[in-house]
Amino acid sequence: MAEYSVYPRGTGNTFYPQHAQNIRNLPSRVRSPTSSARIPFPNPDTPSPSRSPGRQSSPQQFGMFNNAHGHQGQNVMMNGRAGHQNFMQQMNLGKPFQHNQHNQHQHQHHQQHHDITGNNHVSQFNHQHNISSGGMSNVQPHFTPGHLQNGTPNSVHSGLNKPTSEHWQEQMKLYQTAREMTQAHSHARIHPSVSKSVVAGTSNGMQKETDKEERNRPAAQPAQDAKDQHIWTILDFGGQNLKVITPALFNYTFLTKLYLNSNKLTYVHQKIGQLRNLTHLDLSLNNLQYLPPEIGMLVNLKQLLLFDNHIENLPYELGSLYQLEMLGIEGNPIPDDLKQIMIEQGTTELIKHFRENAPGPDAPPERDWIVLDEIQDTAQETVSALSYNILCDKYCTQSQYGYTPSSALAWESRRELILAELRERDTDIVCLQEIDQDSFNEFFRAELAHNDYKGVFWPKSRARTMAEREAKLVDGCAIFYKNSKYILLDKQLIDFANTAINRPDMKGEHDIFNRVMPRDDIGVVAFLENRATGSRFIVGNVHVFWNPAFQDVKLVQVAILMEGITKLATQWTKHPACKNKVVYQFTNGDSEEGAEPDPTQEPGPSKEYSDPSDIPVLLCGDFNSMPSSGVYDLITHGNVSNAHVDLGNRKYGNFTRDGISHPFSLKSSYASIGELAFTNYVPHFQGVLDYIWYSTNTLQVVGLLGDIDKGYLQRVPGFPNYHFPSDHVALYAQYIVKSRKEAKKVSEVDFGPSRERRN
């Protein structure tokens, strides 16, 4: 619908004639009479309010401007001249169709097969026309959508001949709506119709990548979760003439929609980044001059409206809003190059532009090293361990981590960051999860060999059924150890699914076949000996099933893991002493050029362990379980009841008949500080899933790698990014090996000859 003002005169002296009707010899329709005495028109097929025009009559014959161009698609011609130059002459139409005594007229010609989208032009006379082009899809309207009646573009960015994109049409539609929403609480008044408009380009470029597997993470629906947990999740402060918003508002983190339009705000507080469940934010018709960088934390936003403000520059952090469907920017003096992207390609490409060209956040401060206990004796034996889920390349897709630039997701750059951190920490033992066979063989094993590491690796069990080319891309678990300090005595794979289906007590259990067997998760266990001291260690590395809906499966997998470690520990108590413990060296040496020779201690005798629980244990991994889970309870307390809530009503043989237990005394290395703030950091989840467990009777934790700086996280919606190459963070702990208390033999006291004399 278009609203026009008074019609101006053209460039010549041509006016519309009073009664100029083109009489054409067209057959009349049989539906209704062809003549009427009510209207003194000479044409026998004159339209009437009570009947339709002739079947073969021109749809424009009795239109307001009597177009004579047929349907070839040229601009309208009137009185022999181009429509855009002469059809705007002074209104002097035929008397039968003109009512000069009124200032309002409405002429409606119903459109039959297609819509012409035009822009609204307000007129003081409200002379309103709904122009139709009839049934021909190639007939052009009298006014092109992007022009006023005098031929001037209604936007300086609209070309005279270039059609307006659907993205910009939607932008202008919402812009017009926003300018009408000036009443107090206008959104609340029309709430049922707020979400009816369809926005083009809803995927924002995050297309499914068919050649890559998705990360084993559930799809997040934080906004829906907020609705389920709260009675109300929408606030409308529109039209209140507010000049400032209290920061306390941003503590309502459950909000999904916030309307602050039609106020007098000059800035938005940086705490807005706390509202991470927001899907709609309207800041239109204010006096904003900038947006805080924390706006990039709102990664669930689908609509961000900024119409009619004074914003000159948009922050690069907008690139994190990968789910944004509409960014309303009209009415702001933003740079032409950014606006041109929006006009031609829409919100999708503008957000991508920000994401791919963002300089990245400043480097974070180093993570603190937390000292829990001083090492008094420098000769005391120590061991350090690092656990890290490095995010397999196959799971690191743009659709899964749409808030991250593609360059930061590239495996070539991520693996270098991972390698740099491993070298910097330089721990005795490194446990990696989600490392594929190709990366282990072709990159990490070779690179870490320069740092005195050797390693063992097993892929997940599905690799056994795949061709070699596909199998090398399957992720698994790897254990690296310092070769100059430790000898690998044994290594074992624990295949959870295979072990479960072969247990006699679980045969015939439907839950085993339906829930446990389809999972290909594994655990890897290594048996190491310290070359110098003879101390032996059991090192486990595991990646437990991810799905939160399968808490029972996680608990069963860890139960099988602990049962397997118990059996292995029993076997390893009988492992023979290691005789040749001297590090093998080539003639020219293995060390880097110019490096100092390592003054390694002389090898000591292998220690013996009579009880399996006496062997020091380090258990690392991504357990995909929170501290409140059954998995945490089992490992920490040594047992869980067969009625544990995580098992539900499932049937898992002896586990659900007698309960689950293990003989080790284990504790999370970070339990003394209440665990880290998180080990997994993504927009929809920040929590602890990774652990390093240690046996408290043989080891004592003395140092830990602390949390990531909170100030840095205020502008980072999730990992990975340019500084953290995985969505998990590395765990690093140092321990001292407790001295073993040898049991003293009880010897009978000899009292000499006095005993015999008594007898």
Image (cartoon, rainbow, N blue to C red):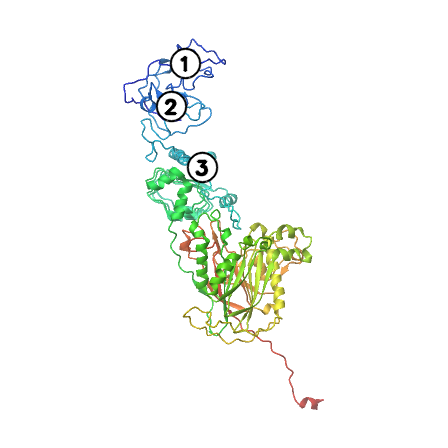
CA gap between label 1 and label 3 equals 45 Å
Residue on which the image places disc 1: 24
Q: Is residue 189 above or below residue 105?
A: below
Q: Position of residue 128 (x, y in %)?
A: 38, 23
Residue 128 circle label: 2
Q: Are marks 1 and 2 in contact (CB under 8 Å)?
A: no
CA gap between label 2 and label 3 equals 29 Å
Identified at 32% across, 28% down, the residue is: 151
Q: Are marks 1 and 3 in contact (CB under 8 Å)?
A: no
Q: Residue furthest right?
A: 759
Q: Is residue 310 above or below residue 2?
A: below
Q: Which amino acid lies under the numbered mark 3 shown in the image of this protein?
A: Ala
Q: Position of residue 384 (x, y in %)?
A: 49, 66
Judged by depth in the image, the label closer to the viewer, 1 or 3, is 1
Q: Which amino acid lies under the numbered mark 1 shown in the image of this protein?
A: Arg
Q: Secondary structure at mark 3?
A: loop
- Depth order, front residue of 271/409: 409
Residue on which the image places disc 3: 200
- Depth order, front residue of 289/55: 55
Give the mark nearer the N terminus: 1 vs 3: 1
Residue 238 occupies quadrant: top left
Q: Position of residue 631 (x, y in %)?
A: 57, 57
Q: Which amino acid lies under the numbered mark 2 shown in the image of this protein?
A: Gln
Q: Is residue 299 above or below residue 569?
A: above
Give the mark nearer the N terminus: 2 vs 3: 2
